[in-house]
Amino acid sequence: MTKKTSLAFQLYTIFRGFTAPMFLFISGFAFAITTIKYVEDYLKFSQKFLKRIRKFLFITLLGYFLHLPYLSLKKTITESNFETLSVLFSSDVLQVIGISLLILQISLFLLKDAFKFSQLSLYMGIFAFLISPFLFMIDFAKFLPLPISQYLNTFNGSKFPLFPWIGYILFGNYIGYKFISASSSENSELFLNKIYKISLLALPLAFTLELVYEKLFNPNQFLIYSSPFLSVSRLSFVIVLFYLVMKVEKNVNLKVHPLQILGMESLFAYVFHLMIIYGSPINPGLSLSAVWGNMLSYHIVFAFFLILATTTFLISYFLHITKQSKHHLVDYIKYAFVSVILLVFFINPY
């Protein structure tokens, strides 16, 4: 049995393929839950609205920061070439979340109607999945600025361009809105059961259509990556898993809810695990990728995954508990850390 046909590798591939869609779907769902509850505050230039805009801009800029080639503004400007700029402006999960939630927040503000907003989110999600293959036929970097073209496909190194990944957030937002609406009439269980059954039917159908699509048209890797059938199969799997997790959490009386805590501290958890695995301008040579590269077996990689997942949860749990008792202290530490990093970035010549 070769490494790539081993059970460990297959489990790793499956998990890797669904973590991003799950993370994005939950981001959209959580946006709807937290927004509809105070919807009137987001229909005007309120403090809540402006705070949201600042938060989503921060998430987007944080995504770019993690791609910086050097922790120096001077060196970034003077020594960057097309390759380093492609990495800097490449779109990752944080940019997808930041830009997508900005679009949703501004759309709600302009529409002034939560129902129309939810319908727009559904139609935009469908459009994002359907338009993606056409966007993956064009090298936009030839006639668009790199910071824009990197959002449209993977041609120049973006791991998660806006398309098709924005679709998961849009569908998550739509389902979150419908869930809140159903909860007001005590039909939330019925609604979740309905989308669960629809997803169970859609999953094998979309998966089969994807196999037929690949067999008949023999598409290249870009068209496979952007296939609407692949996107729908992933979305269906995510909804099924989401439903099952919610059922388990409801029926099992846990003192600590791991998914809830990781959800509340998802930004920290995501950034922390990226820095450990791939590094960042702060720790460019001190990451698993930099130290070991592709030299580890899949069994060792899986062991590292379990250790990293446990460590990330424990730190997230500690951060969550600390925030509850010393919220202002955590804010001061966060602002001080960001200020120091920015100062180093602007004054560091190397």
Image (cartoon, rainbow, N blue to C red):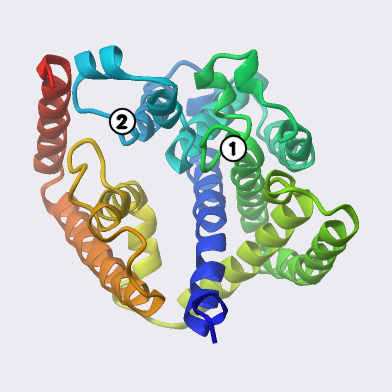
Q: Is residue 211 above or below residue 69?
A: below
Q: Residue at x 10, y 34 (%)?
A: 332
Judged from the image, the secondary structure of the residue bearing numbered disc 2 is helix
**In the displayed structure image, the side of residue 182 where residue 346 appears, left or right:** left
Q: Front-most of 47 and 207?
A: 207
- Spatial CA distance of label 1 from label 2 is 19 Å
Q: Which residue is mark 1?
A: 154
Alpha-carbon neighbours of circle 1 within 10 Å: few (<14), some, or many (≥20)? Answer: many
Q: Front-most of 169 and 295?
A: 295
Task: Please tell me whether mark 1 or mark 2 is closer to you in this view.
Answer: 1
> Is residue 38 in view from this perspective?
no
Q: Which residue is mark 2?
A: 65
Q: Is residue 1 above or below residue 10?
A: below
> Is residue 33 in view from this perspective?
yes
Amino acid type at image mark 2: Phe
Which image quarter: residue 269?
bottom left
Q: Residue at x 12, y 20 (%)?
A: 343
Going from N to C along the chain, the mark reached first, 1 or 2, is: 2
Residue ranking furthest to the right: 216
Q: Is residue 108 above or below residue 271?
A: above
Q: Residue at x 54, y 58 (%)?
A: 22
Amino acid type at image mark 1: Thr
Alpha-carbon neighbours of circle 2 within 10 Å: few (<14), some, or many (≥20)? Answer: some
